[in-house]
Image (cartoon, helix red, strand yellow):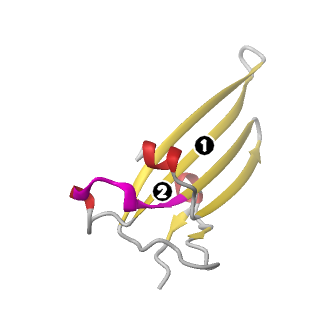
Amino acid sequence: MKALARETPALSTHRQFDHKRQRIEWREVRVFAAAALPAEWDGLISTVIEVRRTRDVFLTSIGEWRKTVKLAYYGSDCAPPSGPSAMLRRSVGTGASRIASIMCVM
């Protein structure tokens, strides 16, 4: 999945910025067609989703900002988006569910 994300242009991208208290977070969600995955995944995964979280947290105990970058990949059986219709919708929840809700577009 990592190689697919490096070599293939994204079909859809969503960026979000969040700033609360002593934390700054950027999220980027990119959607790729899974056509380039090995044949054993045919019919199981139609779309690959990449979620990148970059976080700056101020540590008051040492008086410094620390940056972390986390990258996660998800496989989905939703068909890739076609045309201008967006596959990504912002969720209303809190915590990890706020990143993005991945929904199939019919």
Magenta region: 31-39
* Mark in front: 1 vs 2: 2
Q: Is 32 above or below relative to 28?
A: below
Q: Nearer the viewer, residue 37 or 44?
A: 37
100 or 32: nearer the viewer: 32
Residue 64 vertical placement versus 14 (above, below) = above
Q: Point out residue 4 in the picture as x, y percentages from the top left corner.
A: 45, 49
Residue 78, given in percent of the width and then of the height, sits at 40, 72
Mark 1 is surrounded, within 10 Å at the Cα level, by few (under 14), some (14 to 19) or many (20 or more) other residues, namely some
Q: Which mark is residue 101?
A: none
Q: In this view, does 66 lie to the left or right of 69?
A: right
Give the labeled residue for mark 1: 53
Residue, x 38% and y 56% (percent of image)? 36
Residue 49 part of the magenta segment: no
Choose between 9 and 65: the one closer to the eye. 9
Q: Is mark 1 on a helix, strand or loop?
A: strand
Q: Is residue 32 magenta?
A: yes
- In the rendered image, the residue lying farthest to the left is 40
Identity of the amino acid at label 1? Arg
Tag 2's secondary structure?
strand
Task: Specify few, some or many for label 2: CA neighbours under 10 Å numbering under 14, 14-19, or 20 or more.
Answer: many
Image side of residue 51 versus residue 58, left or right: left
Task: Estimate the spatial distance between the alpha carbons at disc 1 and disc 2, rounded to whole Å.
Answer: 13 Å
Q: In percent of the image, x 69 and y 45: which residue is there? A: 26
Q: Residue furthest top?
A: 62
Query: Which residue sits at x=64%, y=49%?
Result: 27
List x then y, in percent, for residue 99: 58, 56
Please name the residue that numbered disc 2 is placed on.
49
Residue 102 drawn at (x, y percent) = 50, 67
- Residue 10 occupies which quadrant of the picture? bottom right
Q: In terms of image quadrants, where is residue 74? A: bottom left
